[in-house]
Amino acid sequence: MSAPRHQQILDTAATLFAERGFHGVSVHDIGSACGISGPALYKHFASKNDLLTQSLTAISERLLAEGLTRSDSAPDADAALDALIGWHIDFALGNPALIIIQEREWANLDAAGRKEVRSLQLAYIDVWVDTLRTLRTDLDPAEARAAVQATFGLLNSTPHSARISESAMRTRLARMARSALLA
Amino acid sequence: MSAPRHQQILDTAATLFAERGFHGVSVHDIGSACGISGPALYKHFASKNDLLTQSLTAISERLLAEGLTRSDSAPDADAALDALIGWHIDFALGNPALIIIQEREWANLDAAGRKEVRSLQLAYIDVWVDTLRTLRTDLDPAEARAAVQATFGLLNSTPHSARISESAMRTRLARMARSALLA
DNA sequence: CGGATAGGTTAACAGTCGTTAACCAGTTGG
DNA sequence: CCAACTGGTTAACGACTGTTAACCTATCCG
């Protein structure tokens, strides 16, 4: 199996999906952006939908795994929150296309993919919620979840703006997220 | 001219676009959701793209106009910021479909529509930026703009979550937005 | 009364979509 | 050395797309 080509297709598809939306991109577009053409994709993926499913599950798995690692290795809850914020910013700034499709293409998954991605996303949210609730004992789980999701909206907005330097953006987002969560 | 039908089509289209994306909805889908079918839409709109353009410009005009009104009638900058936050939350909670398509279907506009919507959006951002910069003299325009757009991301995340009551969501979002902007 | 008009219908068009089929070159392994 | 497999090609498919055309009916106005 040619793993690099597999990954190349996945990356290319994610970028195109982010730019024009799942239904706005044809398999011919994806193939030709990879130097191959159209139906050749079916040697690597079962369907166009499979491309989206694999992208989204990979994103969710990576967010969750690294989020767990970083928050677990923090000395206390306060540092864990900073670690989560830092990780999410790293990911959003480094992979704007993935952030975009994770936000907007969720509805185009089939039932099975949707279920899997959803549970990974919920697990990731729970990591944040658990951390936040040890710092904010006044928040019940539902309120904490709402606050975390709002913070994701804040952090995920980076792909849409970005007119200041990456390091300035990084520190500004971190400060805004922290004070929003602890307000 | 039947104005109500015009508006009904616009509302229906916006909802469907929000659910399945511009390319994921056919003119037949829109028509049949309105009780008429397919090509009848062309008695009211020039094209499917025209539907999207009119939706997006209407949203941007409304956000800007009401934002200006509310912030102008505030006694000072601090109250103006609260007024802007309150208005944006009102709109986002009341029109989740419109918020969604304004975020994600911008790329599907034709050149003319894109230009008009963009300038309206920039004007709306400027209202926020001007207000914010009288309270935060340390922020240069670019940084203020980045902060405002991040706040929009926070406030616009409501359509994706919403598991707590609307009034609880409203006050939580307002507090988070305010402290993120002033952090 | 009678034409214009507004708002709907169905039929049809050309184009594009995702997907499959049939085929072919190169590599690999028994 | 030959068989199998990998990864590519082009051709063809049926379904669906946005849009136009042709036609019908009710309402309105001179």
Image (cartoon, coloured by chain):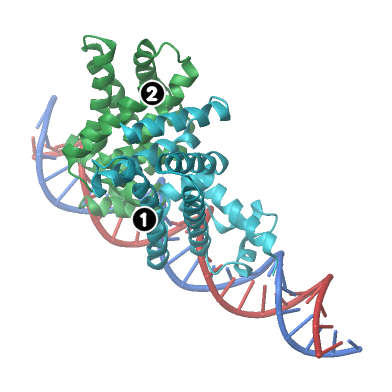
Chain colours: A green, B cyan, C blue, D red
From the viewer's perspective, tell me whether residue B131 is left or right of residue B87: left
Q: Whole-Å distance between the Cαs marked 1 and 2?
A: 28 Å
Q: On what subunit does the disc labeled 2 rest?
A: A
User: Which of these two is toward me, D20 or B98?
Assistant: B98
Q: On what subunit does the disc labeled 1 rest?
A: B
Q: Quadrant of residue B143?
A: top left
Give coordinates of residue A67: x percent, y percent: 27, 21
Q: Which residue is mark 2?
A: A183
Q: Element at badge 2?
A: loop
**Quarter of the image that includes the C terminus of chain A:** top left
In the rendered image of this protein, does residue A122 appear above or below residue B117? above
Q: Which residue is mark 1?
A: B122
Give coordinates of residue B133: x percent, y percent: 31, 45
Name the amino acid, label 2: Ala
User: Which of these two is toward me, A120 or B180?
Assistant: B180
Q: Residue visible at 30% across and 54% down?
A: A29
Q: Nearer the viewer, mark 1 or mark 2?
A: 2
User: Which of these two is toward me, A1 or B170?
Assistant: B170
Q: Residue visible at 50% across and 37% down?
A: B159
Q: Element at badge 1?
A: helix
From the viewer's perspective, tell me whether residue A45 is left or right of residue B63: left
**Quarter of the image that includes the N terminus of chain A:** top left
Q: Residue visible at 48% across and 62% down?
A: B49
How many numbered dots are placed on residues in this image?
A: 2
